[in-house]
Image (cartoon, rainbow, N blue to C red):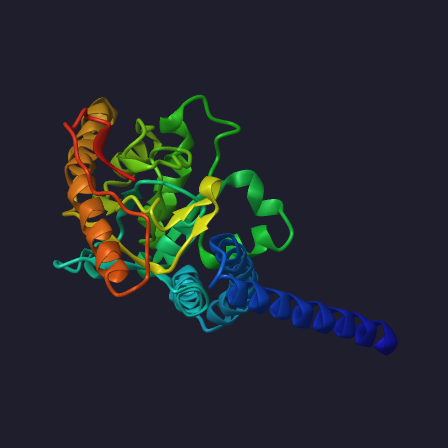
Amino acid sequence: MFAIVSAVSSAISWFLVRYIVVTAMFYLLSYVSPLAGFVARVLASIMALIGCALYGVSASIVLRLSGGDRWQISQWATARAFKYIMALLTGLTFEVDDPKNVLGTARPAVFVGNHQTELDVLMLGCMFPPYCSVTAKRQLRSYPFLGWFMSLSGTIFIDRANSKDARSAMSGAANAIQSQRQSVYMFPEGTRSYAQSAMLLPFKKGAFHLAVQAGSPVVPVVVANYSHLYAPAKFRFLPGRIPIKVLDPIPTTGLTSDDVSALTERVRDAMLQEIGPLTLKGRAWALATASKGKPIPVSASTSTNTGTSTGVSL
């Protein structure tokens, strides 16, 4: 048994050493090739994600054993670790504008934000408040490792398989929010947009049914379009800062399922008003960086707002 463990440890060590060496080589090549920089940061991100996932499992177990409601900060602790490691390895981070400290005071709440790419995992790492979790399909609870981590860290599971509509699918999650005072973060667009401009896809209503059933406020979180820094289809992955703005909570007290459509549109309209100026702010940060000798492909042209896009693009 000892020989097997030793052999496995040795193999993992050799793999990690080679992985780190290859990543470092691509970082060196990035000075002459943007593609090499893309590969280097992707490899570094994968390494950071795996490392933080392992840390998250350990943190969840320790916080569960510590008693009380500390287990509810497991995802926050894991997210913060990912934030700092990614800033160190890739030079990319999100900066949160939350002047009223909504992230620190709204509990429980349903946080909703625009969903652009897989980089939104880092976005959550930068803005995720304590006592908040993501949502997931109930079927994932039985998955080894992933399901265990989700269960230990307070993921709100949604039972879509046995539900006829969004309202019934959210009923169990609403009960969990009320009983545990656990906030959740959801992407009402339902899928990644990979947008090249400041825009929003149509919103699905599940998050808003959940907020109404739980009697919790909806907190819109707007993330600037960041395609000038990260665009996988263009093999672009650059260091920089991306602005996030936390808007005022929208109460749901007294609302019913009949009000969900109006609530959905109200939140989407509020986010549309902010995403254009916020994207211009992010582009301005990039231009300031470029003026210091670090060229970044940016255009900050605007056109008439159509209701889905502000026209701010590359």
Question: Which percent across, then down, holds residue 183?
Answer: 32, 51
- Between 66 and 25, the residue placed more toward the observer is 25
Q: Nearer the viewer, residue 148 or 3?
A: 3
Identify the residue shown where x is 26% and y is 55%.
Answer: 286
Q: Nearer the viewer, residue 183 or 99?
A: 99
Give the left or right position of residue 305, taking residue 156 as reference. Answer: left
**Can residue 201 be seen from the camera position used here?**
yes
Q: Position of residue 111 (x, y in %)?
A: 28, 46
> Which quarter of the figure is the N terminus placed in?
bottom right
Q: Is residue 76 left or right of residue 276?
A: right
Q: Give the residue displayed 24% in from the left and 44% down from the top.
A: 216
Quadrant location, the C terminus:
top left
Residue at 63% x, 70% y is 21
57, 269: nearer the viewer: 269
**Above or below: residue 7 compared with residue 139:** below
Q: How many marks?
A: 0
- When the figure is inspected, residue 61 is found, relative to residue 148, above or below; the finding is below
Residue 169 on image: x %, y %: 42, 31
Q: Residue at x 45, y 46 (%)?
A: 118
Left or right of residue 121, residue 110 in this image: left
Q: Is residue 8 above or below residue 149?
A: below
Q: Is residue 120 left or right of residue 241?
A: right
Residue 157 seen from this side: no
